[in-house]
Image: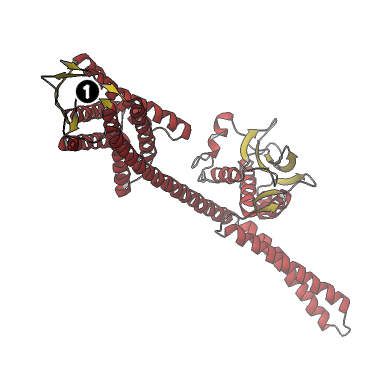
Amino acid sequence: MVVTGTHDPFLVALSILVACFASYTALDLSAHVGPARGFARRVWLVAAAVTMGGGIWSMHFVAMLAFIMPTPVSYDIGLTILSLVVAIVVTGGGFYVISRRSASPLRLVFSGIFMGLGIAGMHYTGMAAMEGHAELSYDPLIVALSLVIAIGASTVALWVAFRTTDLGQKLVAAVVMGLAISGMHYTAMRAAIFTAHGPVHEAQASESLDQTNLALAVAGTTFVILAFAAIASLFERKRAEEALRQAQANLAHVSRVMTLGELTASISHEVNQPLAAVVTNGQICLRLLALETPRPDEMRAAVERIVRDANRASEVIQRIRALAKRSEPQMVSLDINDVIREAIPLVQREVFIHGASLRTELASALPLVLGDRIQLQQVVINLLMNGVEAMAPITDRPREILIRSQREAGQVHVAVRDSGIGIDSETAERLFSAFFTTKPSGMGMGLSISRSIIRAHGGRLWVSPNADHGAAFQFTVPIDGQSIS
């Protein structure tokens, strides 16, 4: 006599929810596998395998408990545990193969087949753990269909796991994977045929647990474990973001020091000018003191010039020290025109040596922006130096740099225009890629770091060709009080 079972809709929904939550957590954890190395990579791989395999097994077990038979049913503990181990091992194997750098489409297919057959093996092992007063057999066609679904779901799961980083995509992928895994289980359950022989005897009360309570206990335990895994993944992501931010800051500091190395002559010139004036005025004071008739007014004026030039030299040194100093960004309200004026003296000598001229068109009464003075100076210096070097080969027209500031809607706009060799549209965007450079001795980091700085300020940095000659590097910074995206 064929025995027909029914499904508890509440537990069916719970099993699908478990599958989706497990899929999302596994996707989240698997994102740490690729970048990690050594022991950390193995830890994240095991965590993703346990999460995915354990989640699939938990979904399967809750779904089994959702299946209500008219005859008493119990479960063999050994086979039930074996089904859990199978799920974790095959999931870990699939994740390991596809997470390797050399993973190819062929490896993806073989991994999907291996993982799909393993999940199917987990399911049918779990089915074999059922003990009751009915004989279990299967419809071969529906079994084959369940295998196809298991392999397809596994292949998609592996492909998505290491290619999805966006939160929205991850949520959609988790739902799709959860539904596919659940679909495989319920298809396989549809293939099951239970045949009872002889009269059905009631089982002892101690031989089985209330199915609903047991399902809730399994699902609850699974949710708690998955929640801890998700929290661990969140903390790791925050740590990685902080490490990346620190690495970018260190790289920006190295770039500033390299820039200072290139500007040594200009810096020396900037410091030597006020120091030479101090020496000259000091000599004037000595000559005035040597006169028979003191000239206090002239001596006072000379001393005042000494103090003024000494302060000027001190300011230059302070600017240089600030530019070279490795420190955290200090976001304050500032005038972008002051940033430009403080940066120009540091490149003035380079401009002179290359036979170029530099002029400014700075809009008056610009609103204040929120930014780090030193970082913005670094951007301006980098753009000015690029303009100077772009004009080096030019011999048939004047070498001119124009730096302009103006207000736009909710932001301040700065443009550095040169009359150099120009730039084509294909190269324009690549200029901002790390280590890409058009200069024989360049490292290709200046513009990449400059764009990172401007983005951190909530602005945008880009380049465009001028109408006649050369190129224009432009950036925007939000006005203080505007939101920084």
Q: Between residues 5 and 182, which one lies in front from this camera angle?
A: 5
Q: In percent of the image, x 24 and y 34: which residue is there?
A: 87
Q: Position of residue 406 (x, y in %)?
A: 75, 41
Side of 299 relative to 34 (left or right): right
Tell me where residue 129 sits by quadrant: top left
Q: Within 10 Å of the Cα at label 1, are there few (<14), some (14-19), or many (20+) other Cα atoms?
A: few
Give the amino acid at mark 1. Answer: Pro
Q: Position of residue 415 (x, y in %)?
A: 69, 40
Residue 351: in sight, yes or no? yes
Q: Between residues 249 and 165, which one lies in front from this camera angle?
A: 165
View extreme (bottom): residue: 292
Q: Is residue 292 above or below residue 256?
A: below
Q: Is residue 141 above or below residue 338?
A: above
Q: In percent of the image, x 21 and y 14: which residue is there?
A: 141
Q: Residue beneath label 1, please?
A: 70
Badge 1 element: loop
Q: Is residue 188 above or below residue 477?
A: above
Q: Position of residue 476 (x, y in %)?
A: 66, 41
Q: Give the total number of marks visible in the rendering.
A: 1
- Quadrant into which the N terminus falls: top left
Q: In percent of the image, x 83 and y 79: which residue is there?
A: 288
Side of 161 relative to 420 (left or right): left
View extreme (left): residue: 198
Tell me where residue 468 sits by quadrant: top right
| Colouring mode (rainbow / by chain / secondary structure / one colour) | secondary structure
Q: Position of residue 425 (x, y in %)?
A: 58, 29
Q: Between residues 42 and 338, which one lies in front from this camera angle?
A: 42
Side of 251 relative to 464 (left or right): left
- Quadrant into which the C terminus falls: top right
